[in-house]
Image (tube, grey):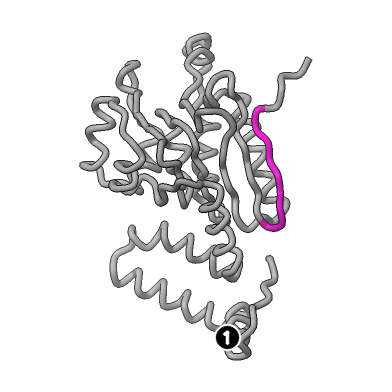
Amino acid sequence: MNAPQVVHVGIDGAVATITLDSQHNRNALSRQLLAELHDALDAAEAANARAIVLTHRGPAFCAGADLKERSSQGSNESDSNPFVDALVRLMDTARPTIAAVKGAVRAGGIGLMAACDLVVVDESTTFALTEVRIGVAPAIISVPILRRVAPSRIASAMLTGEPFDAREARSIGLVTHVSADVDATVDALTVGILAGAPRAVAETKRLLHEVPAMDRPGAFASMGRLSNELFESPEAAEGMAAFVEKRSPTWTTP
């Protein structure tokens, strides 16, 4: 008998919603969950979704590694590649990704959340980087976390494993929005994304990742070329015509 599905994907217009639903282990990062997460990302891309929302069912967004599964594996069976690949896909897809978090987030779950471009969390959400308390380090997830947060701002949480709340997560830059109504905030964000031109949004996501790592002359040169190219694009022609004509632009999805 096949195991119940633990990741669901729904397409509503141009928005793909991926839902983690492995409630028996608090949406831990099991091999099955990661495999189905990749399948869901494939489905979102195949549908030409313009935004991807990653959310969950149950009281936890994600508890991190599936420790029961890990403890039952031999030393040669531990494979971090599916998790790494999932983080990379969330970070590198041209589509803006939004984590919609209504429950606790622990360890690797924080990395999954941090790999998204925008992170909307409920006011009651708590977080903890508990790796050191089980004898490991937050190694892989440090990559998406430290692109958002200065090391000195997250050092205490990483070194002690002590929990912290949504207000602290927002103050250090780990999350972008703290909300009393996560769904409404996410809906507003997706409406804003869809109002922009598809390529313009994709290029904006790309430059948010790439420009901070560039030297200043290189950044100006690269961004100058991009600006000229976009101003000469069909999207810009449509956007400026719509502005002059006081109408909403009509975008063509690539």
Label 1 residue SS: helix
**Position above or below: 216 against 146:** below
Residue 104 on image: x %, y %: 44, 30
Quick check: is 157 in the magenta stretch?
Answer: no
Stretch in magenta: 6-14
Residue 167 seen in render:
yes
Residue that mark 1 sits on: 243
On screen, residue 32 versus residue 101, left or right, reads right
Principal SS element in the magenta part? Answer: strand
The residue sitting at the front extreme is: 180
Front-lying residue, 137 or 224:
137
Identify which amino acid the numbered label 1 is placed on: Phe
Quarter of the N terminus within the rendering: top right
Q: Residues within 10 Å of mark 1 (few under 14, many from 20)?
A: few
**Position above or below: 126 against 54:** above
Quarter of the C terminus within the rendering: bottom right
The residue sitting at the right extreme is: 1
Residue 94 seen in render:
no
